[in-house]
Image: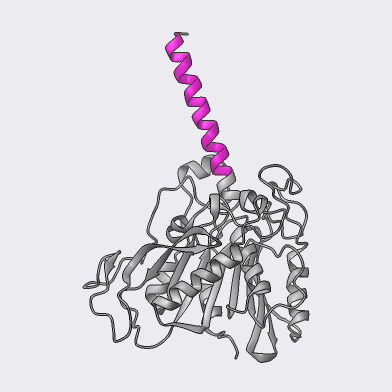
Amino acid sequence: MDQRVRRAAAVLRSASAALAITSALAVLIGCDAVRPAREQAGSTAPPGTAPTGTAAPTPGPGIPAVAVGSSARSVTVGGRERTYRLYRPATLSLSAPVPLVVMLHGALGNGRQAETAYGWNSAADRYGFLVAYPDGLRRSWAVSSDCCGPPARDGIDDVAFVSATVAAISAALPVDPARVYAAGMSNGGMLAYQLACRTTVFAAIGVVAGTLLGQCPSPAPISVIHVHGTADDVVPYDGRPGKLDNGGTGPLPVKIDGGPVPDQIDRWREIARCAAPKVRTVGPVSTSAARCPGGRDVELITIAGAGHQWPGGAPQTAAERLLGLDPPATALAATESIWRFFSTHARQS
């Protein structure tokens, strides 16, 4: 074989291997690295609205001008500049306080990826709320001393960062303090649990394919909705170690030892003194919902056969199919389900 041909073949093999590794890791811990940036169907601004990133035309009295659409922002926490994206629907009225959803990406993702992958901007357009997309340092979040990746290794305080992000947005726009919510995918879902355990900022959290790491004996009064597939092999539903677990060792520590998902949900219900849950099953989707004192709820949605993906996401690309990666479950739209839950749960004073 000609030497140039051999070199080209080697390059192609290396590139293919790199793509396979990146794609597998991406889908395993919650991002869409093999997909180009995309807008979700239905996210196009209505006719006559300002395009993404343009200044608001006429802010109301006392309301500072803030970009309509998606804008990049930053906040300084512990002497370090941290970044996030903020989405403000063009048709959202600021004449009264509005809800805010903080969407936390999975490991290897970032705020822009989460903004394009999960359909929250479209939901914000339909239902009227703000969405923030914080960026984890080096594309991951510290949720324990053993997880996950460089932020855990370096002792980054991501709870402080997300709290500061909410404070910065609330200083610029009329955010309703009783309707601030956190949603997260995988590693981001783990951070959402930490926000519930270590702050009093949030009215409810929504977790997809995540878990609580560490103890949380006395969380603030909060409602929880958790969505998980029974075939998840990264954060397994039955609590066994997942594919990426390395025991929390090395330069990229990953130790996921939260235990079985149903047991975790039972712990939250016990802490919240909830009533016995009511269970309903439609096809592969089983919902176990428990009412708790003070208007709280703790809900678990289990999807039989679903893997480590955001249910209701865009169909797989050809590359993802060739790599045999988990397809998004089609039996549930996670964003719609989580927002419906959030919209009926304000933080109790």
Q: Coloring scheme of the render?
A: one colour
Residue 222 in picture, x, y percent from top left: 64, 80
Mark count: 0
Q: Is residue 332 visible?
A: no
- Seen at 29% across and 84% down, the residue is 60
Q: Nearer the viewer, residue 347 or 151?
A: 151
- Seen at 61% across and 55% down, the residue is 308
Furthest-front residue in this view: 79
- Left or right of 282 in this view: 52: left
Furthest-top residue in this view: 2
Q: Quadrant of residue 203?
A: bottom right
Furthest-left residue in this view: 48
- State yes or no: residue 17 in magenta: yes
Q: Which residues are magenta?
A: 2-24
- Seen at 73% across and 83% down, the residue is 272
Magenta portion: prevailing SS class: helix
Residue 114 in picture, x, y percent from top left: 48, 59
- Seen at 78% across and 54% down, the residue is 240
Residue 346 in picture, x, y percent from top left: 55, 86
Q: Nearer the viewer, residue 221 or 336?
A: 221
Residue 83 in picture, x, y percent from top left: 46, 59
Q: Nearer the viewer, residue 111 or 171?
A: 171
Q: Quadrant of the C terminus?
A: bottom right
Above/below status of 314 relative to 279: above
Q: Quadrant of residue 211?
A: bottom right
- State yes or no: residue 262 in magenta: no
Above/below status of 6 relative to 252: above
Q: Is residue 240 visible?
A: yes
